[in-house]
Amino acid sequence: MNPKFTTLLHNLNEQLNFIDLEIDDQIKKCEQAITIILKSITELKKSVIKTNFKTETEEIQFFKEIKPQFTSKLVYYNRIFKIEMKKPNGGNRILKKYYNNELQKLKNFFDNELEFYQYYRSGSTYLDYKYFLRNNFDIKLALDAYYFETDKTFATSHDFKIAKILANDLVELYIENQLLMLENKENTEKSQRKPNVKMTWTGSKVALVELMYALHTEGVFNNGSADLKEIAEYFEHIFDIDLGQYRRAFLEIRARKSDKTKFITTLNDHLLKRMENSDEVI
């Protein structure tokens, strides 16, 4: 790489790193970053216009490998700025939907540019002379309209596509990080959402064992995948009770001469009476 380009890129990265550390507000960060990047690209353009590339290989290398390192940063910060500016006010569900829609936009770009994307990612070079030499475009390559409005002394038909590919990789990481933070926030809120009152089981242990076996039989925990030991340990934890030899207790329940489901029968009777009491305020 030309030493001028190397120095320019190094200085740009240092300034962007400084902004990233000093500014927390994403919108302000993007605004300052875009201003700095535009100045850097202007300097890069001046150097290129003054420079006569010695060979086509040198020119291809610049527009395929060097310039996109600058312009991809501009695309990235501009995209993040738009994402943050349009971000809706709402709960986690609304924000997740918004960010997932943004991910879908990235996928749409990938689908639309699949052929060139595969060409670039595979390290192919056989079309470089069409893609990355100035004033050497091929209308049959279905060029984007913006290319015809660019300064042809500082643009080729496909250097900006590479910039978008590089930027989209970073945008995807940014969005996935936002989704991860939302997920962590939800998990934290759930873990902190504890009841104000501690519930203690004041019925008999045999009654709780009877209820536990009934719930396990019905498969109401984890879609029926929770085993009896897991349910027993959970009950012991939330009710702060030692169920002891609950399997032996179940055998005693089975051995009852009458009303084997005594506790559940009582629950059923009392609930029916409550429902019949039309004066009760729910």
Image (spheres, grey):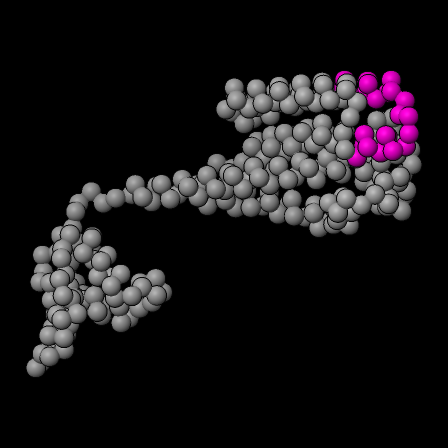
Residue 162 is situated, as x and y percent measured from the top left of the image, at 75, 38
Name the residue nearer the viewer: 29 or 7.
Answer: 7
Residue 202 vertical placement versus 70 (above, below): below
State the residue at coordinates (70%, 32%).
72
Residue in the image at 40% along x and 40% along y: 185
Q: How many marks?
A: 0
Residue 203 image-quadrant placement: bottom left
Q: Position of residue 155 (x, y in %)?
A: 83, 30
Which residue is pictured at 54% across the width and 42% down the height? 176
Position of 130 compared to 25: left or right?
A: right
User: In the displayed structure, does residue 175 sit left or right of residue 184?
Assistant: right
Q: Quadrant of the image for the C terminus?
A: bottom left
Is residue 135 placed above or below 251 in the rendered structure?
A: above
Location of residue 121 by image quarter? top right
Considering the image in quadrants, where does the N terminus appear?
top right
Q: Is residue 45 magenta?
A: yes
Q: x and y percent of residue 228 in the render?
A: 25, 66
Compare residues 207 and 149 and report the one nearer the observer.
207
Q: What kind of secondary structure does the magenta stretch mostly adopt?
A: helix
Name which residue lies at 76% across and 38% down.
161
From what the image shows, is residue 271 above or below residue 151? Answer: below
Q: Is residue 207 above or below residue 31?
A: below
* Residue 205 shows in this picture: yes
Extent of the magenta region = 42-64
Q: Does residue 190 appear left or right of residue 33 in this picture?
A: left
Residue 80 magenta = no
Please say whether residue 270 is visible from this viewpoint: no
Residue 147, given in percent of the width and then of the height, sits at 83, 35
